[in-house]
Image (tube, rainbow, N blue to C red):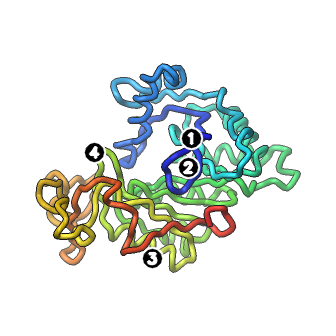
């Protein structure tokens, strides 16, 4: 089994590898970093050939036929994150190959497959094609074991991607708000008045060597919206940065030799970055964060672990 450290799933399955960047959330892509290592490994270099160059995605996407049968050999039921190293709905992936992936998932009803995309328009195109196939005459649509989600990192990407996700008939529709780079209101009148149609929200800060800090108010706001609407909320982690009030003043990590970021007058570099942090915070929302590493920062939000799953799933 392809085990993973991602807290909200059990395994990863990558029938597609390679990608291209779309929005600010892609800037420090973990998969791009990992792909560089895998492309240099003789055991996996063939799969990743051409997908990265000089440390960056090239935009080339490779289908990996020799892993297609993996889920069929996993006897124990599990949650499976589909394409942690790509986007199944990338414009370079043929619809015919996506159909093969879906056919395999339909043949493995013991597993729950979690598909996450930044390209909901392509996903909608596929689903409209898929809905017309004879398989759906047998009552398998929408299949209960296939969840579909979109990645959103700020209000702009939420407004662009969520309305399209809501047009797709999926058993579970979910959001991954990671890295969370700004506040997100999930109740704009333009598409969603009460979180109707969304069944699960994941949120978290960014990790990695160039991680950007996440204001804790952004995560709290998502949690509060989910609680008000009865939608399960999963807080993955703070990433590399922890709010000042969660770092003990007696802890040596607290002192200035560690990087600090203040949301208020300055960002991490002493400058505001309009594309990432669009507005300065009012005084009452100013926050100082310390970079202490993902492991040390942990996953407590207001002193509690929030690892909720959709009702009826194995995670729940």
Q: Measure how far apart labels 4 and 3 are at the Cα level.
A: 29 Å
Mark 1 crowd level (few <14, some 14–19, many ≥20, 10 Å Cα): many
Q: Measure how far apart labels 1 and 3 are at the Cα level.
A: 30 Å
Label whose residue precedes the other's in the sequence (4 or 3) = 4
Q: Measure how far apart labels 1 and 2 are at the Cα level.
A: 8 Å
Q: Residue furthest bottom?
A: 228
Q: Nearer the viewer, mark 4 or mark 2?
A: 4
Residue 210 numbered tag: 4
| Residue 205 sits in quarter | bottom left
Q: Residue at x 35, y 52 (%)?
A: 206
Q: Is residue 105 above or below residue 197?
A: above
Q: Residue furthest right?
A: 138
Label whose residue precedes the other's in the sequence (2 or 3) = 2
- Rendered location of residue 312, percent (x, y): 69, 67
Q: Nearer the viewer, mark 4 or mark 3?
A: 4
Residue beneath disc 3 = 224
- Rendered location of residue 301, percent (x, y): 38, 70
Residue situated in front as seen by the camera: 245 or 22: 245
Residue situated in front as seen by the camera: 172 or 12: 12
């Amino acid at each position: 089994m392809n085990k993973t450290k991602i807290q909200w799933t059990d395994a990863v399955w990558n029938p597609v590898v390679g990608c291209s960047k779309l929005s600010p959330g892609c800037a420090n892509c973990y998969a791009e970093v990992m792909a560089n290592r895998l492309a240099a490994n003789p055991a996996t270099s063939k799969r990743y050939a051409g997908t990265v160059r000089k440390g960056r995605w090239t935009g080339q996407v490779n289908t990996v036929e020799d892993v297609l049968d993996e889920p069929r050999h996993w006897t124990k039921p599990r949650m499976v994150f589909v394409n942690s190293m790509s986007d199944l709905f990338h414009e370079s992936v043929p619809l015919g190959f996506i159909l093969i992936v879906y056919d395999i998932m339909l043949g493995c009803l013991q597993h729950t497959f979690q598909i996450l995309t930044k390209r909901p328009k392509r996903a909608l195109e596929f689903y409209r094609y898929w809905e017309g196939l004879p398989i759906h005459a047998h009552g398998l649509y929408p299949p209960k074991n296939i969840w579909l989600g979109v990645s959103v990192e700020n209000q702009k990407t939420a407004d662009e991607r969520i309305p399209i996700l809501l047009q797709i008939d999926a058993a579970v529709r979910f959001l991954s708000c990671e890295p969370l780079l700004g506040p997100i209101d999930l109740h704009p009148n333009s598409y969603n008045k009460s979180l109707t149609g969304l069944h699960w929200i994941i949120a978290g800060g960014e990790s990695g060597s160039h991680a950007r800090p996440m204001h804790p108010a952004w995560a709290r706001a998502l949690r509060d919206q989910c609680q008000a609407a009865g939608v399960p909320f999963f807080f993955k982690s703070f990433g590399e940065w922890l709010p000042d009030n969660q770092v003990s003043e007696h802890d040596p990590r607290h002192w200035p030799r560690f990087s600090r970021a203040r949301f208020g007058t300055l960002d991490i570099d002493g400058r505001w970055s309009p594309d990432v942090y669009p507005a300065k915070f009012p005084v009452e929302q100013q926050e100082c964060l310390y970079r202490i590493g993902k492991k040390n920062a942990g996953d407590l939000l207001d002193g509690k672990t929030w690892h909720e799953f959709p009702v009826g799933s194995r995670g729940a």
